[in-house]
Amino acid sequence: MHVHLFKRMQLRDFCKSSVESLQEYIVIAQDMLHVEHYIRQDEDQWLLREYHREEQMLELRTIGCTLTLEDIYEKVSFMDESDEDEGPNKELHPTQ
């Protein structure tokens, strides 16, 4: 099982059993442009919305906030093919 899938399952199980007041949460990928937005539908069901383009709008209704993926990843640059020879730890870089 992939590590991030396992972590997502742990988070889902935690949210289902421990945090009844939690209405939505987001999971932000650190190595690619990808956001998962989970919205509680009822006690045991969550709606998943996935975002993968910079111009997409993510609306967090419970806190009255709307962001684009471009906003979320504003200071992140991802490794491109020309950077691959610099090692596995050079996947993303916060800009100064």
Image: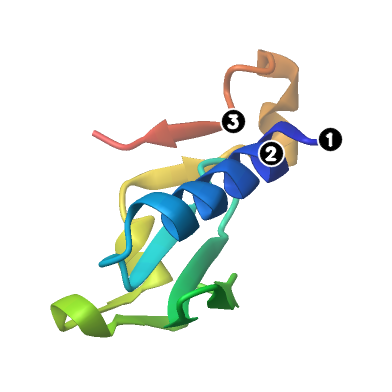
Residue drawn at x 25%, y 85% is: 61
Closer to the camera: disc 1 or disc 3? 1
| Circle 1: element type | loop
Report crowding for label 2: few under 14, some 14 to 19, many 20 or more residues within 10 A (C-alpha): few
| Residues tagged 3 and 2 counted as in contact (Cβ below 8 A) | no
- Give the residue drawn at x 45%, y 53%: 17
For the residue pair 63 and 72, the one nearer the viewer reads as 63
Residue beneath disc 1: 1
Q: Mark 1 and mark 2 in contact (Cβ < 8 Å)?
A: yes
Q: Are marks 1 and 3 in contact (CB under 8 Å)?
A: no
| Tag 3 residue | 91
Instruction: State whether residue 55 appears in this view.
Output: no
Q: Quadrant of the C terminus?
A: top left
| Image x and y of residue 54, in percent | 48, 72
> Which class describes the residues within 10 Å of circle 1: few (<14), some (14-19), or many (20+)?
few
Q: Residue at the spot x=55%, y=50% of the render?
A: 13
Q: In which quarter of the view is residue 80 placed?
A: top right
Q: Is residue 37 left or right of residue 31?
A: left
State the separation of the CA atoms marked 2 and 1.
7 Å
How many numbered circles does the render carry?
3
* Residue type, numbered disc 2: Phe
Distance, label 1 to label 3, CA atoms, is 22 Å
Tell me the residue that label 2 is attached to.
6
Disc with the residue nearer the chain's start (2 vs 1): 1
